[in-house]
């Protein structure tokens, strides 16, 4: 265990973890009934858990008769004790621009002002608000303002294209979209407002556009539709009574990729989600009053929801929000920010660690990182080499590393070490969080493997309060995606190994989802973008191992008859996918495929395509069902160089 001389005692030790874990599984009602008290309820709940995992009538409810307001829990209730404490430290992209320290009292004022601006646009309880913003304080105000009036936000990552934005606005039938003129990142600017203008051409006329003038960059303005948020906020009242909502009323929708083409609107509700985000933030990161907590994610992902905004603010923490990227102006930026703001807990993704490791340790060593007490990672399995570098060079061997396994769907950490309680092993997410009952199933029989040492698919046996409740507008899809294949369990989509010590090791997705730089991508999404191009007849997309990104995107493309495969066309297709989905979906490699390997019934044999992309074509496995074996020879001969 690390040297903890000056640090406060850990919240739990090994014995306490065992005791609490056992209690949480033995009597979830009692355990979560007690934990629910960490929130302020308007009307306290009398019923804790009401869950049915039985196919097809899946229903998940926590604290169902309680009422509360999420924004009051994250802001108002702290005013008396810590009104002057910094709630949010905002560090801009440009290191020479001043950081902002937003006190809880100021956060309260700004959230109320923004809430009143939304109300003035006719937004009320249950209405959907799409947020398409850079990492600026207004993103936090917008989330909390939406929650304050009982509306539902859906954040679209600012790296997504106009098309992706339009699809999400339409799917959730949003009343307003909140955006900014431009999003600065790494010294470059993304034109968010013009992206939004392009998106809104495909949306209902009534959708209002609230624009944060952030950089002051030139934008076009549609009178009657576009609203200057800062000007309206300045004129708005700082009073806005929080709306009373039910524990099971939706708090947000967040779109995420699955194995089919269309992103799913993951729905999280108010009570259980907030209990779970707050509790995991406290225990996993061993957060204590006065600590400075930094999660480097973007609020466009669930990590930003739970661990920049909701978890930390529910706990009255000081949370850091960073607009920039790890490598701008150079590879020291993360560490400079840690030094400047005396960060105690630092939470990032393996892909960032690998990229920074590649730049050399000097960038870390020139900064004073003595404030750091804990390091965390999330998003994909971390390779031991990156883990060790993080541990030795960044943590100086003194900071426990929490490798947190969870998903957009789970709301918060499900499998993670607890510092002070669970010994780590590089590359393992270790043990379940309180109340979480993981099981490993045999993928073919669906039977639970009860031996400690096991390998198979990772499912969860019972609910936890942070679990998603449904897919927006499509409960059937929720049930069929997560509860149909393995009846009676929540199916994570991940493969997993459990070692002799009962430690969990995530081995990656077992469905057609790939993980590119910790971002989740359905291969079907990229495929449908490719085939939407007039030159493309057919496309198949798979992942392949990539040194920095974890997985890269490998696309096999069959062109329309008569179309010549050229370098220009390759570039055009890359650009096309960027514009259809966003830069994160751009294929790393495109191979021209005269044909794709198919079974006689016409099903694409992705297993073979994966092997070729992985450069592992010696082990293609059973190819006897291939309709045209020659196709495979051609693909192997013309495979792309992965370097
Ligand atoms: C998928 C979920 C939850 C926030 C970030 C991603 C992979 C996530 C880990 C980890 C191994 C991990 C899984 C999971 N994943 N964390 N610590 N070790 N794999 O959220 O976009 O919903 O993706 O990310 O494959 O299913 P997401």
Image (cartoon, rainbow, N blue to C red):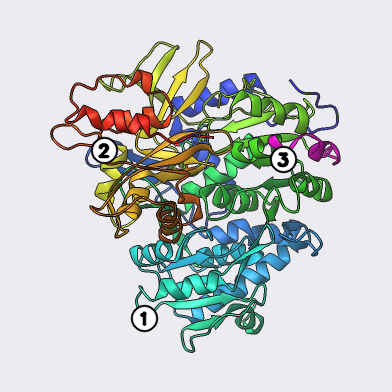
Classed neighbour count for the residue bearing mark 1: other residues with Cα under 10 Å, few (<14), some (14–19), many (≥20): few
- In the image: residue 599, left or right of residue 6: left
Ligand 1 neighbours mark 2 (CB distance < 8 Å): no
Q: Is residue 523 above or below residue 614?
A: below
Query: Per the image, is 367 magenta?
Result: yes
Q: Quadrant of the N terminus?
A: top right
- Per the image, the residue denoted by label 2 is 596
Residue located beneath label 1 in the image:
205
Give the structural element (helix, strand or loop) at label 1: loop
Query: What is the spatial separation of the Cα atoms under label 2 and label 1, in whole angstroms?
Result: 43 Å
**Residue sitting at 45 percent across and 58 percent down?**
575
Closer to viewer: mark 2 or mark 1 = 2
Specify the label residue 71 is tagged with: none
Residue 162 covered by magenta stretch: no
Element type at mark 3? strand
Q: Secondary structure at mark 2?
A: loop
Q: Which residues are magenta?
A: 358-371
- Along the line of sight, the residue nearer the viewer: 529 or 285: 529
Badge number at residue 345: 3
């Amino acid at each position: 265990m690390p040297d903890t001389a000056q640090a406060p005692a850990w919240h739990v030790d090994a014995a306490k973890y065992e005791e609490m874990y056992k209690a949480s599984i033995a009597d979830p009602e009692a355990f979560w009934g007690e934990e629910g008290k960490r929130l302020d309820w308007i009307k306290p709940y009398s019923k804790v858990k009401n869950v049915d995992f039985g196919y097809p009538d899946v229903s998940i409810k926590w604290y169902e008769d309680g009422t509360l307001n999420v924004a009051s829990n994250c802001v108002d209730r702290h005013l008396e004790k810590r009104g002057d404490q910094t709630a949010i430290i905002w560090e801009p992209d440009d290191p020479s621009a001043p950081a902002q320290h937003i006190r809880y009292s100021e956060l309260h004022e700004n959230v109320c002002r923004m809430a009143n601006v939304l109300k003035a646009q006719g937004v009320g309880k249950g209405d959907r608000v799409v947020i398409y913003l850079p990492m600026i304080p207004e993103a936090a105000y917008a989330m909390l303002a939406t929650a304050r009036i009982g509306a539902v936000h859906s954040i679209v990552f600012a790296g997504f294209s106009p098309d992706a934005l339009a699809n999400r606005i339409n799917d959730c039938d949003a009343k307003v979209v909140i955006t900014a003129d431009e999003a600065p990142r790494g010294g470059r600017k993304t034109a968010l407002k013009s992206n939004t203008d392009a998106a809104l051409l495909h949306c209902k006329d009534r959708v209002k556009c609230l624009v944060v003038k952030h950089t002051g960059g030139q934008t076009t303005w549609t009178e009657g539709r576009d609203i200057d948020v800062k000007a309206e906020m300045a004129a708005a009242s700082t009073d806005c009574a929080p709306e009373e909502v039910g524990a099971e009323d939706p708090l947000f929708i967040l779109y995420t990729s699955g194995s089919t083409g269309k992103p799913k609107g993951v729905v999280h509700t108010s009570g259980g989600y907030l209990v779970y985000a707050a509790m995991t933030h406290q225990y996993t990161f061993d957060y204590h009053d006065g600590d400075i907590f930094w999660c480097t994610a973007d609020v466009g992902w669930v990590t930003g929801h739970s661990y920049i905004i909701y978890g930390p603010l529910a706990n009255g923490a000081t949370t850091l929000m960073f607009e920039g990227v790890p490598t701008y102006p150079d590879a020291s930026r993360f560490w400079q920010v840690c030094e400047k703001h005396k960060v105690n807990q630092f939470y990032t993704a393996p892909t960032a660690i690998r990229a920074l490791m590649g730049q050399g340790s000097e960038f870390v060593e020139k900064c004073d990182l003595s404030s750091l007490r804990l390091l965390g990672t999330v998003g994909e399995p971390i390779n031991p080499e990156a883990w060790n570098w993080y541990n030795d060079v960044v943590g100086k061997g003194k900071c426990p590393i929490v490798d947190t396994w969870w998903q957009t769907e789970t709301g918060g950490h499900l499998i993670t070490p607890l510092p002070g309680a669970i010994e780590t092993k590089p590359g393992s997410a270790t043990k379940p969080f309180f109340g979480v009952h993981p099981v490993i199933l045999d993928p073919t029989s669906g039977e639970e493997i009860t031996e400690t040492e096991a390998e198979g698919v990772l499912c969860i046996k019972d609910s936890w309060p942070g679990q998603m409740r449904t897919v927006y507008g499509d409960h059937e899809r929720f049930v069929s995606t997560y509860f149909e294949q393995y009846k009676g369990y929540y199916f994570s989509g991940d493969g997993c190994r459990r070692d002799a010590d009962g430690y969990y090791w995530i081995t990656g997705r077992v469905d057609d989802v790939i993980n590119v730089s910790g971002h989740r991508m359905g291969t079907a999404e990229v495929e449908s973008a490719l085939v939407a191009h007039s030159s493309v007849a057919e496309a198949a997309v798979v992942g392949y191992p990539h040194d920095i990104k974890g997985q890269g995107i490998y696309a096999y493309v069959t062109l329309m008859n008569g179309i010549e495969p050229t370098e220009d066309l390759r570039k055009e297709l890359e650009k096309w996918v960027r514009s259809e989905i966003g830069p994160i979906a751009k294929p790393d490699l495109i191979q021209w495929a005269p044909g794709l390997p198919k079974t006689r019934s016409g099903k694409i044999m992705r297993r073979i395509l994966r092997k070729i992309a992985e450069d592992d074509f010696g082990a293609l496995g059973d190819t006897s069902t291939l309709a045209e074996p020659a196709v495979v020879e051609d693909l192997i001969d013309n495979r792309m160089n992965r370097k």
